[in-house]
Each structure stands twice: as structure tokens, then as C-alpha cells.
Amino acid sequence: MVDHLNPAPVIAIFASDRGPGDPERASLMSQAGTYIAKRGGRIVCLAERGLIPTPLITAARAAGGTVQIIADNSLALPPALAGINTEVLETRDERMARIAELAEAYVALPGSLASTTALFGTWTLAKAQGRKPPVVMLNRHRAYEVVRGYAADVLSPGLAGYDRVVQFADTIEDLWARLSRLVSEAR
């Protein structure tokens, strides 16, 4: 949703620092939160089943950024996250629909399969709302190589201009450059 009074983009960031995978996930979340907040991006993130992207939120707030959490009723914020704009919704569909409504773009950081599934569920709901928010995935250590192959093989024939909607970045700086360009084009 474009807020014409506040031109900073609202970016949904999907990230998880639990489960098997890249041991640098917490560090990447901190870097992304800082970088995006310092450039004016407003962040919205999902918190479910007690999983909160704490490093992302903490870093974004420390950099002066705005963060909103869309959560289930298991949310128990640690004291360091007190005062964050939080919206608790009963069902997963409601949470994903709310993120789809709020976000102008999506970022996927290397994380769990659950965060990737939430990203694509939310993106599908945004498309059902008549929107095509861009998605940029941080492909650090080839974390999204399978998704990149899927996009080339499956999305490309069925989604005209998919490369203007789904992109992959190798660094946080590249992620922001792609994201800001895609959001500007969409506006």
C-alpha cells in the first residue's frame, strides 16, 4: 500500500534464524535491517509460533527504522522489542493477507523453508488483490538457487515479465539497489 504522505517503501522481510541452514542468518538479518532502515525503508515482518526475526528488528530500530510485526497469538516480545507496532491476527491467512495489503515489496533472506513458504503465500495473496509486488531474494551461499531455477523454468513461461517481479541478489547492497529500482518502477 503506497502511503503518499510517507514515500518510504513498506518492505515485508521474510527471515528466520532457527533450524538448519546458513549459520550467518542472524548476521544477515542485522545487516539487512540496518541497511534498509538507514535508507528509509519501513519494515513489516511476520512472527509466528514463537519465531520472531529479532536480529532484523533490533538492527532496524537501532538504525532509526520503523518496524511493524504481524503476529499470531503466541507472540511474546522480549523486553528489547517493547513498543513495536504489533498486530495480532488469529489465522495464518489473515496474517499473510495483512502483510500483502501493507507491503510494496518483499525481501527473502536465507532462512527456513517456513519463511520462504510464508513469502510465496503472501505474494500469492497480493496477486489475488490485483497487485504484483516485487520480490528480491538474497541468494547468499546459493540459498535460493533452487527457487532461481524454478523461476527460470516455471515462472518465465507463465508470468510475463517475471524478471521485473522476482529477482535475486548476492549482497545486501545489491538487494537494496534492485529493491529500490523495482519499487520506483511499480509506483
Image: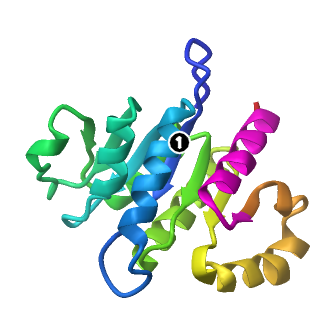
* Horizontal and vertical percent position of residue 177: 72, 46
Task: Give me the residue at 77% from left, 76% from top.
Answer: 151
Task: Give me the residue at 33% from left, 36% from top.
Answer: 61
Does the stretch in magenta take in 177? yes
Does the stretch in magenta take in 180? yes
Using the rendered image of the protein, determine whether residue 143 is visible from the camera's viewpoint. Answer: no
The residue tagged 1 is 36
Query: Is 85 drawn above or below residue 154 in the view shown?
Result: above
* Horizontal and vertical percent position of residue 14: 46, 60
* Horizontal and vertical percent position of residue 105: 62, 46
Instruction: Kindly identify the amino acid type of the residue bearing the numbered disc 1.
Output: Ile
Query: Is 116 drawn above or below residue 96 in the view shown?
Result: below
Q: Quadrant of residue 85?
A: top left
Give the magenta-colored segment's residue range. Answer: 168-186
Q: Residues within 10 Å of mark 1 (few under 14, many from 20)?
A: many
Chosen colour scheme? rainbow
Task: Identify the main secondary structure in magenta.
Answer: helix
